[in-house]
Amino acid sequence: MKQIVLFASGSGSNVENIAHYFRDNPKINISCVLTNKRDAQVIDRCNRLKINVLFFNRTAFYETDCVLSILKTFDPDLIVLAGFLWKVPEKLIDAFPNRIINIHPALLPKYGGKGMYGFKVHQMVKENKEEKTGITIHYVNNAYDEGAVIHQAETSILQTDTPETIAEKVHRLEYEHFPKIIEKLLL
């Protein structure tokens, strides 16, 4: 059975979507969700879904091997960043080469890099009068949003769209494509 470990910092809607997608799949299991926010909504979702969830702090992530040890215990086939906002340390990338993926709410290389996440991206897309946006699923490397692209999906933007409606369109793409790409990478 293939094992997935997810990282999340926020509400966990992608975590829940991925959990529902793989719920009845005998070949893929979500071992654990790791979060860096003690009050993240993803914790409530994981409790409801009966998925192990662990909290860690900045020291455990960057200054010790605590998170690395936890990951090695689970021996994941894939580590999935699903709304996780911290830069992954090099020691994790080196320990799990080409096994850490991220989803970004834009068509990289546009609107990527440090500080470009979530609603900020959608606001910038609107301000710049883009005609399309989308998602990029990519491998994680040592630079924000610069890992090799695995998959992109796009949606058109209407003049009447707001950052909120753009966010809704992008979320639909995330929910549709992210689990399928995870499955494709694992099987």
Image: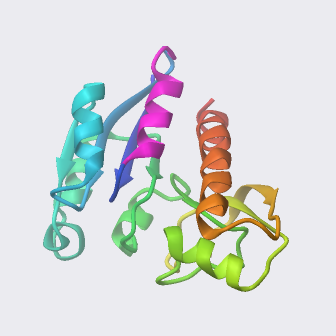
Considering the whole magenta stretch, tell me its main secondary structure: helix
Which of these two is toward me, 91 or 107? 107
Give how far across and how far down residue 43 sits, in percent. 23, 44
What residue is at 74 percent from the left and 85 percent from the top? 128
Q: Quadrant of residue 85?
A: bottom left
Q: Quadrant of residue 167?
A: bottom right
What residue is at 51 percent from the left and 52 percent from the top? 99
The answer to whether 11 appears left or right of 183 in the picture is left
- Residue 15 lies, with reference to residue 161, above or below; the image says above
Q: Locate the N terminus by quadrant.
A: top left
- The number of numbered discs placed on residues in the rendered structure image is 0
Q: Which residues are magenta?
A: 12-25
The answer to whether 124 appears left or right of 94 in the picture is right
Give how far across and how far down residue 63 sits, in percent. 17, 76
Q: Is residue 160 magenta?
A: no
- Residue 153 lies, with reference to residue 85, above or below; the image says above
Give how far across and how far down residue 90 sits, in percent. 39, 74
- Residue 112 lies, with reference to residue 155, above or below; the image says below
User: Is residue 2 in view from this perspective?
Assistant: no
